[in-house]
Image: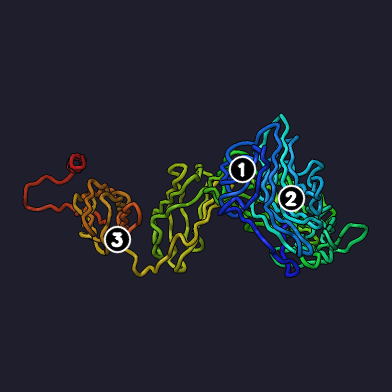
Amino acid sequence: MILFVFAALADPVDSWNLQQDDGGLVPAASDIQWAWGAPSVGPASGATGTRAWGTGLHGPYLNDAVGRLRLPPRPLAGISEPMLVFAHWSDIADGDAAWVEAFDGTTWSVLEPPYGYPSSEGFTGSTLGWDTAFFDLGGLDDLSDVRLVFSADASVQGVGWFIDDLELWDGDIVPPRIATLSGPTDTEELDGPYTVEAAIEDDHTVVEAFVFWETAKASGFEPLLESGGTWAGGIPGQEPDTDVTWWIEASDGVNVADTDTETFRVRLPAPTDLAGLDGRIVDVEAALTWSAPASSHVIEGYVVERLGETVAEVEDSEATVEVLGDGEDEFAVRALFDVGLGDASDPVELDVVRPQLISVEPDSGYQSDTLTVRLEGEYLLLVEDDVDVGLGEGVDVLEVFVVDVDRLELTVAVDEDAAEGFRDLLVRTGDVVLPLEDAFEVVNGAGRPALVSVRPDAVRQGDVTTLVITSSTEIDAEEVLLDLGDGIVIEEIRVEDDCVEADIVVEPTAPLGTRPITVDDGERVFEGVELRVRDALPVTEGTCSHAPVNGLGLLGLLLGLLVRRR
């Protein structure tokens, strides 16, 4: 559609907007097509209001009929350059047509618009909305010497022809007409210019024409020059990855017309056949492959993007990239040419479940601690004898036990001189390496929970007694593991607050000397006190008539101990 601007050299003389009344337009006496009012079909309103003239306001026009609508009386004398302007809307079937006629005092003949009708029959087909028509009334005496004619054959019907906003002007109000002959298409050419050609005409003279352009970064215009009836010019070169919008404007010195906007893209080609692994991927990274684009420019490498963000730059047409899961793994790739970055390829979305570490308990240990650390995750796919765990220098992982595919138990020893502070946990399972930042903290050993006393602190071979072991902190466990060394049988253990009571039997052959006591509450090994094992009391002879301890007496003692243990 052509847009136009009326200049000061054209003056309005009269107008009929058809909203208050029918404007004085008169159908022919025998006419059964034309009617004035608010249409419910076709445009469903006037151009600037609810009412208009139409060839049927509430249904399709009639077949095999001719309708004639004469314009109202209005003398044209004294108007040097009378021009009729009206808005019209049409939906006209093949074989039917509409046109304007003028009376010269003797006969009616077809009145041509400045640039002719769209077809040899007149107005045909559809306007796709309200359009503007211009007619030169020079040589006519009165506006009533003009009539609108609609002719329908006996076959298919359309909606009809509708008229609104009649105006009478004096002067040049007809804008140039522009027909674009050729324009730029998507291109790899960066230097430009991108050629535009148009056929431009005017009812008087085309004075000048320009091609206007704009991008996200800049805008401008260039003159079009006429040669052999064709106006041509060019849009300057642009960077790659640039969308250019352009249009043409032309002026006759009074009126300006422009075209609809058009676009083209300056781009470097994208890689093709981007692909990853089929099916679900359970990993922290994935391999991508693609094919190089065909181009006259030199490819220096590739940029891999995840949802528009760069994640890798490589030289060859393949890459291994980190994956995130949760629908975040849509990738595209661009070629990096010697002249700039190319377009993104069609994206590929990977179905990813990312293994991850969730929790570490406990997440801290004292210098000199020995701990049982429980590690839990998701989709870890842990396999016995194929798992390595590291906690950094000064923290030794002594044992790794796979509880199930997502859980580990670690025996961890913290060196007495291990550096204080946080450290990362690193788990390798198969080919997957999973880090967990700041997962474990080493704290100063001065505050380490420890055993502070044992009562009694010495026992003898053959003793049956109860040990009371006290800790510096409450032991938060209903059951503990107690280690008293070789030769001491533990019959029952009771835990309350910071105290562990143990009923024990010291075997007659228990090794003599001092041994450390350890209490394991399932998370931490408590140490700090020792138990001394002494030899049995000697049997002395007195005045009482007791038989000396002999082999049978010793056997009886052992049997007694056995019964007590049971």
Q: Closer to the camera, 494 or 145?
A: 145
Badge 1 vs badge 3, beta-carbon distance below 8 Å: no
Crowd rating for badge 2 (residues with CA inside 10 Å; few <14, some 14–19, many 20+): many
- Quadrant location, the C terminus: top left
Q: Indicate which disc, 1 or 3, sits on the residue closer to the N terminus.
A: 1
CA gap between label 2 and label 1 equals 18 Å
Q: Which residue is label 2 attached to?
A: 146
Distance from disc 1 to disc 3, alpha carbons, whole Å, reads 117 Å
Does residue 559 appear left or right of residue 14 in this picture?
left
Binning the other alpha carbons within 10 Å of mark 1 as few (below 14), some (14 to 19) or many (20 upward) gives some
Q: Amino acid at mark 2?
A: Val
The residue furthest right is 228
Residue under numbered circle 1? 35
Label 3: which residue? 530
On the rendered structure, is 309 left or right of 525? Answer: right
Circle 2 sits in a helix, a strand or a loop, which is it? strand
Residue at image position (32%, 53%) is 520
**Residue 120 — which label?**
none
Determine which quarter of the picture holds residue 456: bottom left
